[in-house]
Amino acid sequence: MEPEYLRSFYRKLIDGNHILHHHSLFDAYGHLSMRHPLNPDVFIMARNMAPATLSPDDLIEYQVSDAEAFDPGSPEGYVERRIHSEIYKRHDEVNAIVHGHSESIAPYTITNVPLRACYHMAGFLGPGPVPVYDSAQHRQSGDVPDLLVRNEYLAYELAKRFDDGNVVTLMRGHGLTVVAQSVELAVLRAIYTKKNAVIQMAAMTLCTATGTKLEDIHYLGEDEAEAAANMTRWSGARPWELWVREVEASGLYVNHA
Ligand SMILES: [Zn+2]
């Protein structure tokens, strides 16, 4: 029973990678992982490769404890895979994680302009500014200053940003990391975080062009954000089905799982 049961999860993980590429959350870089459905001390993620061309043979099982592959003969993994292990270690409720470098997000990571929930599809961002993790604040002597989360310590500091129910963290000069209870919800949150970033940029541009005060932009309030976050939780199957059909129809993506 186990291989057939797992196959549906592999299929979902591969679809999720393809969808995130199709929606420009990923390019040749970026990664989506899921916690193993039968063993919470394990997570599954692609080998070091472009997510658009992922197939089942490229999936590797890693230990949550140290992000090392179970099979020592596994191909090379992503250098940033400790982002995933440290979050799974700290947050039992998280079963899927997206990390990517969307250019729509980047401006909010390098300015003092906070990303905020602009519309109902992004209520999961919460009523306050989305937190920004700065690797420079946590680097130790000898660490390579390339902004990548290369070691357990840098990843541990990032994992703390998901305390208190936060589900999205921006990363200065780098990108974003998104967590959820399922692959479908992680993908949805990543996609709508990006759309929200584009909407906020348009609203700010509109204000600047018309001499309207930026302080007058009406972001979601606390009760609105909470209610809207619940809405995307129960309605998330609808976009997932559409997005799977889109990648199946595109010709670039092949899911062999
Ligand atoms: Zn990265």
Image: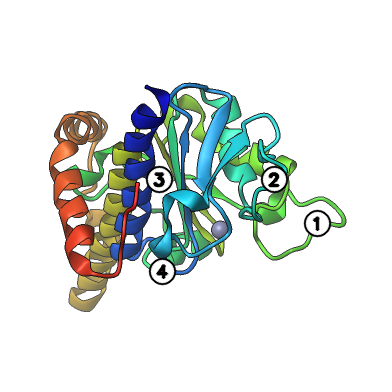
- Residue 48, percent from left and from top: 58, 59
* Mark nearer the viewer, 3 or 1: 1
Asked if the residues shown at circle 4 and circle 1 are in contact, with their CB atoms under 8 angstroms apart, the answer is no
Q: Which residue is drawn at 24% across and 33% down?
A: 229
How far apart marks 2 and 1 lie (CA) works out to: 10 Å
Describe the element under mark 3 as helix, strand or loop: loop
Mark 4: amino acid: Glu
Kindly identify which residue carries mark 3.
Answer: 129
Mark 1: amino acid: Asp
Q: How many marks?
A: 4
Kindly identify which residue carries mark 1.
Answer: 143
Is residue 102 positioned above or below 46 on the image? below
Could one spot residue 181 in this view of the protein?
A: no
Kindly identify which residue carries mark 4.
Answer: 103
Mark 3: amino acid: Pro
Q: Earlier in the sequence, mark 4 or mark 3?
A: 4
* Mark nearer the viewer, 4 or 3: 4
Q: Which residue is drawn at 22% across and 55% down?
A: 217
Left or right relative to 53: residue 197: left
Front one among 49 and 116: 49
Left or right relative to 47: residue 127: left
* Mark nearer the viewer, 3 or 2: 2
Asked if the residues shown at circle 3 and circle 1 are in contact, with their CB atoms under 8 angstroms apart, the answer is no
Q: Which of marks 4 and 1 is nearer the N terminus?
A: 4
Asked if the residues shown at circle 2 and circle 1 are in contact, with their CB atoms under 8 angstroms apart, the answer is yes
Mark 2: amino acid: Leu
Q: Earlier in the sequence, mark 4 or mark 2?
A: 4
Q: How is the image coloured?
A: rainbow
Ligand 1 image position (quadrant): bottom right
Describe the element under mark 2 as helix, strand or loop: helix
How far apart marks 3 and 1 lie (CA) works out to: 29 Å
